[in-house]
Each structure stands twice: as structure tokens, then as C-alpha cells.
Image (cartoon, helix red, strand yellow):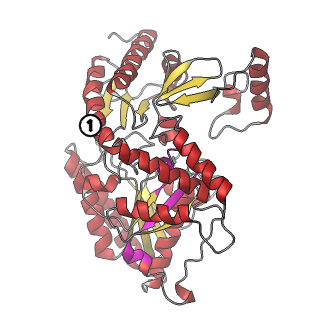
Amino acid sequence: MTTETFTGEQIENLRQTAGEHLFMHAMQTADWRDGALKVFVKGEGVWVTDIDGNRLLDGMAGLWYKSAGYGRTEIADAAYAQMVAIDSPPAGSAIPSTIKLSGVVSELYPDHDARLFFVSGGSEAVETAVKMAKKYRILTGKQGAYKVMSRRNSYHGGTAMAVSLGGSPAADTMGPTMPGTYHVTNYNAYRPTYHQNPVDEAIAVANEFETVIKHQGPDTVAAIIAEPVSAATGIHIPPPEYWHRLREITETYGIVLIADEVINGFGRLGTWFGTERFGIQPDITTVAKAITSGYLPLGAAIATKKIADTFIGDDTRTFKHLITFGGHPVSSAAALKNLEIYKREDLVGNSDRLGTYLYEQLQKLYEHPSVGDIRGGMGLIAAIELVSDRETKAPFPASAGLAKKLPPALYERNLVSFRASDIISICPPLSINQDEIDFMISVIDEALTEIEKDLGLAC
Ligand SMILES: Cc1ncc(COP(=O)(O)O)c(C=O)c1O
């Protein structure tokens, strides 16, 4: 397959069209419309080529999803074959690829008797899980259980309910959030709220859920939702005690525990599912992104048998929830091939092994005075938090302009990052090798040296 090439004039025209007609998601149009938009034309393994011919390592696996890496023609072939056979089902029926995928994922999921509600992405998976939890509580006798609890400074998607759950002041909510959402403190051992000891801190912040549940009345609460490892806000890895406590609290009050594994799921933490790392079984797990490695859109709410069986019976028990393209057969075919590749190349094992290597190698970046905290060591996901003063952990003032300086410093050295500023997130494809990890770290090292020089910090 040849890669399409573009002349200087075509590139200019593309940028102009984008500047005039395209909304980039969660980006300020003025920041890129005058020619600064990054445009990519090819991907291979962990490498991507931009329209100007620069080859860069994608240190963010797209947006936390390109786990099998770029350029997998066998995924494209599987999708093509499904599309020409039959692309989508007549109303009220199913196609083998979607059926097979429900079986394959259930085999991988700790509860092999799970049932999957397929959707088309992470936000829909979260919406589905929350609605399922509410209806489960109604069906099991708690008519008034509509409240949902999550953590402040988390991220669960861009739709109205999911944004409400995120609890982030940066979210563009435009008015009241979903009634009945309650937020508690997120786990953050670098900036703890109660205790310096991570286990004590974890239990204290988990206990905040119980405090709110008791105050609101346990029979009014449907669910708690949390990411096993909070990714979007800086890779905070709690000790297992945190998740054990969440499981204990939810079991005590009969509340549904939802693990949002839209990023963590399918190997990111070095296990198929993130909660396996913490030794607990949630009631519902949400997945998306890496289920297809981003080749096509797909997501799912995975319900344990306990939850799913509640929806079997007469019409009052039906889960009346419908997403037209949920579990699209072409996406399902891509997902099946993607998961086959994971198994064949042991990408989950690679995530575990190379995640440890990545974390060890990252330690040398502590030589930089701006590096306050390095988090990782649980699969191929890590974060570096930059501070202006390591003792006080004071963040850099906005005037330091990190958000404008750091991404280009990484890009010029051929590393793609995502919103790198106070926190540099690292989330490469799970197919990465050791040399490529070394490359990533050397680029970050050089970029930090340049930034620190610019800010007048001695290295
Ligand atoms: C933990 C988590 N949940 C849900 C979502 C929403 O997924 P999507 O953007 O596919 O709707 C995201 C997206 O990044 C996420 O990180």
C-alpha cells in the first residue's frame, strides 16, 4: 500500500480548510488555525509520519488507545471482509462478529459468565453502565437509588452525564450537572489530603465515599464509578487497599461498583483488566479505546452475571437502552483480530515487563530539578509531574508557559505527547520495544534540559 503524498500547496489547502471548517476536540481554534495544526498521514508500529515527512514516536498511543500499534493490515483485512459480507444487522438481530466478541471478551474477563452491552465509545460505555446500575438497584428493590458517586478531578467522558461524573473544574459543563452526582477526593499520594503514608491516605479517601453514602442515605445511591488507575489526571496508582475498601463499602450498602477501564482495560496495566491488579471484582466494567486499538470505534459495559441476570424475566426487567451502532459488526471484527494479535504477541505480558523497565529508566529523570514526581511501574503507563520547587511541590506559574513550551520541545525531537505541561503522560503502544522506550526517555531528558535552561533552573 503506498502512502498518499501531498504537495506544499495541498498541505497549505488542507490547513486552510481545517482552519476555516474544523472543530478540533477540546482545543482552542486560535491556537492552531493559522497553520500550526499537526496532520499525520502514516503509522507503523509505534511510529507516525506527519504530513511534512517527520517521523515521530507516538508516546500517547493516539489518545490512550493504539495498543497494538499502527499499520496492522490484518485488522484492516478483517474489517473489510466483514464489511463486504454484511456490514450491519437488520433491526433486532445480530451478526456473528459481535456475538463472537462477547464470548472472547468474557473469556478474558475474570467473570467468564459476564454479558456485554456494546456501544460505540467510552462515554457511551459509562452512560450505559450508570443506567444499568440504576435499573439494577430498582429491580432489586431500591426504587429511590439514583445517586452516583465519583471522584473529583477524574474523567469519565464528554457526554452530559459523563462530564458530571468527571468532577473536574476544567470541564465545560454549561450549567447544572446531572442531578444526583456526588464527588469525593481522588487518590493522590504526591499531594495527599490526609496522610503521608499511601495506604493510610488511600483508606482515608476511600472512606469519604462511605461518609457521603451514610449522609445521603444508602438506599438513594445507585453506584460508585472510578478508574482503577486514574489516568487522564496524571496516573495515580493507589495501593490495593483502596480498591478493597471500595469493594467493601459497596458490598456493605448494596451499591454497584463500576470500574471505568476505558483506558486501563485490555493490557494497559499489564493485566487484561485493571482491577485484576488490585484483586477485586467490580460489578460492571466499562471498556473502549484499546478493544480495537482505535482502528474502529467500539466500547462496552461488561456486566457480571449477578447484574446481567437481573435483567432477565418479563418486560419490566428489560434494559430499555439502545445505541444504533453499538457493537458495530465491522468494529467487532476489528476487535476480534486486535485481541488475537494481543494474544499472539503477548502484548499484555509486554506491557507488564516493559512497564517495569520504563519506570526504572524514568528514575534517572529525577536528576532534573523540575521533576517532582515520577509515577508508574504498573504496565506501560507513567507520568512525570513537574514542579517549580521540589521541596514545596509548588507548581510552575502560568507565566512559565510550560503548556506552550514543552509539547514543541518534544515534537521537535520526534516524540508525540498530549497536553504535556505540568504533567507529562506516557502511554505508548503495548507493542513498543526497549530501544523505543530508551528513545522516548532520551527525548524527554533533552526537552527538560532545554526547558530548565529557558526557565533559569540549574540542572
Ligand atoms: C476513563 C475514561 N472514561 C471514559 C472516557 C470517554 O471515552 P470516549 O472519549 O471514547 O467517549 C475516557 C476518554 O478518554 C476515559 O479516559
The residue that label 1 is drawn on is 353
Q: Helix or strand or loop: what does disc 1 sit on?
A: helix
Query: Which of these two is toward me, 71 or 287?
Result: 71
Percent position (x, y) of residue 270? 31, 45
| Residue occupying image coordinates x 39% and y 12% | 449
- In the orientation shown, which residue stands out farthest toward the bottom? 314
Percent position (x, y) of residue 272? 35, 52
Label 1 environment density (alpha carbons within 10 Å; few <14, some 14–19, many ≥20): some
| Residue occupying image coordinates x 37% and y 68% | 283
The quarter of the picture where the N terminus appears is top right
Query: Which of these two is toward me, 458 or 94?
Result: 94
Some atom of ligand 1 lies within 8 Å of the CB belonging to the residue at label 1: no
Q: Is residue 436 visible?
A: yes
Total tally of numbered discs in the picture: 1
Q: Is residue 388 visible?
A: no
Residue type (three-letter) at the residue carrying disc 1:
Arg
| Residue occupying image coordinates x 50% and y 52% | 335
Q: Which residues are magenta?
A: 287-308
Compared to residue 86, the image places residue 19 above or below, namely above
Percent position (x, y) of residue 55? 54, 20
On the picture, is 296 further left or further right than 102? right
Residue 375's quadrant in the figure? top left
| Residue occupying image coordinates x 32% and y 27% | 372
Q: Is residue 74 magenta?
A: no
Query: Which of these two is toward me, 285 or 221?
Result: 285
On the picture, is 162 further left or further right than 104? right
Q: Is residue 301 magenta?
A: yes
Percent position (x, y) of residue 176? 61, 59
